[in-house]
Amino acid sequence: MKSILILGVFLTLTNCNMISQDKINLNEFQELHKHNGSKNYEVVELFDNKMVINEKILVDKKNGNLFSQASQEDKLNKQEILKTKRITNLGDELDSLNDYYRILNDGTQYYSWYYSNWIINSDTTKHKYIDPFSNKKIDDPYEFTAKEKDPEKWLEKFKELYNKAQYVYEDSFYYFKIDEKWYLMDPYSKEIKNLSKNIKQQYPPKEDQDIRMVELQGLSPVFYFDPPEKLDTQLIKKIDYESTYYKEKKGLDSFQYSAGWWYLEIYMPLGDTLRIKRYSYFEDPELRLYKIPDAYDGRQDVLFIVQKPKNAHIEQVAGMYAIRPKDSKQPQRRYSQIVYKRDKEGYKIIDKEQSVESDEYKVWIKKKQK
């Protein structure tokens, strides 16, 4: 019943919108992987439209670099292609790994058998974890057994490492970061199990003392089809939706489902409008929008876009893109003070007559006109 109501409201609002937007040429809207950009901005591909992007996009607090991970199924060779990329605040790829690790808060790339400091210092070496009793590297944690069998002595060493560690991570084992090296202990082995029944409650992970990596918060609207006065359309706005797939089922489990082309406008800080189209289901174009915050050396004129694919629709592609300035020296913003007004349809837009252009923008415009 809920999906029927939502679809009904959505199609009603879409039909109203089509009347008010009948002068817009939908041929001007392009998919991101085919987009030509605008006067001041270009669209660059960071991962192609077959790569599925990880839900978490991370930024390095120390240098403002963005880290994104993606995967793709290689059916021909029956394997999965994995990628991790380091990307600048301007959307340039610095370097990449043909791998996909879990990234801890301090920048360590964690894997069960080893870890890497590539994010921290660009070293791609796969380091083994260390046994704190022998100070020797552990080849296979799942086959390894500590020589210390005395539970009391084992627990004493565990407490020592826990108290010293700048970072404590728990997964199948406990991992302790001390002086840039990682040590491993297994509190769940049969020799220690009587001591470790409540060990996670007594010794919880410590992951908030050395935070380097921060997850970016998405800027995508929660809804696209509310009345104009309820929508925040300063960044992106739905212009039209064209259904090309419709399915209806009647009975106790009745539902209606539609998928098709979304036509969207993205508004950039210098006043450019980029018209994009995207295939998705009727409730959401399934685009995730991100900007690196100013606090982490981000630019307000660089927008990162992640597309979520859907196997049911071959047209609903994946990939990650950046909309960025063609001239990296151009001002990030046009206005130093923005005043808004409502257009004929009731959408919130910039009042160009009342808003104040920045001195930086005025100087840049004069230089371009010469």
Image (cartoon, rainbow, N blue to C red):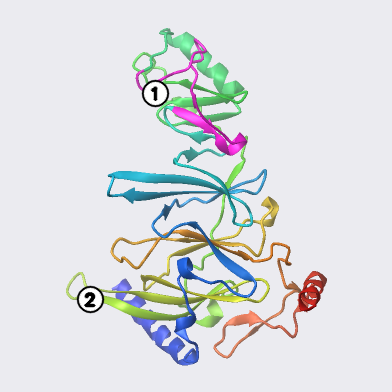
Does the rendering let one see residue 283? yes
8 and 182: which is toward the camera: 182
Counting from the top left corner in percent of width and height, residue 112 is at 42, 30
Relative to 15, is 180 above or below? above
> Is 142 part of what is drawn in magenta?
yes
Dot 2 alpha-carbon crowd within 10 angstroms: few under 14, some 14 to 19, many 20 or more: few
Going by the image, does 138 lie left or right of 269? left
Identify residue type, mark 2.
Answer: Glu
User: Residue 248, which numbered label?
Assistant: 2
**Disc 1, disc 2: CB below 8 Å?**
no
Q: In which quarter of the image is residue 49?
A: bottom left
Which residue is rendered at x = 45% and y = 71% of the image?
Answer: 31
Which image quarter is the C terminus in? bottom right
Relative to 1, is 101 above or below? above
108 and 82: which is toward the camera: 82
> Which residue occupies the extreme left position in the image?
251
> Is 144 part of what is drawn in magenta?
no
Does the rendering let one see residue 107? no
Which residue is rendered at x = 78% and y = 71% of the image?
Answer: 364
Relative to 318, is 278 above or below? below
Counting from the top left corner in percent of width and height, residue 108 is at 54, 35
Q: How far apart are marks 1 and 2 (CA)?
A: 52 Å
Which image quarter is the N terminus in? bottom left
Single out the mark in the foreground, 1 or 2. Answer: 2
Which residue is rendered at x = 45% and y = 82% of the image?
Answer: 27
Q: Give the range drawn in magenta.
A: 114-143
Return the disc, 1 or 2, that comes first in the chain's sequence. Answer: 1
Dot 1 alpha-carbon crowd within 10 angstroms: few under 14, some 14 to 19, many 20 or more: few
Number of labels in the image equals: 2
Identify residue for label 1: 197
Identify residue type, mark 1.
Answer: Lys
Q: In which quarter of the image is residue 285?
A: bottom left
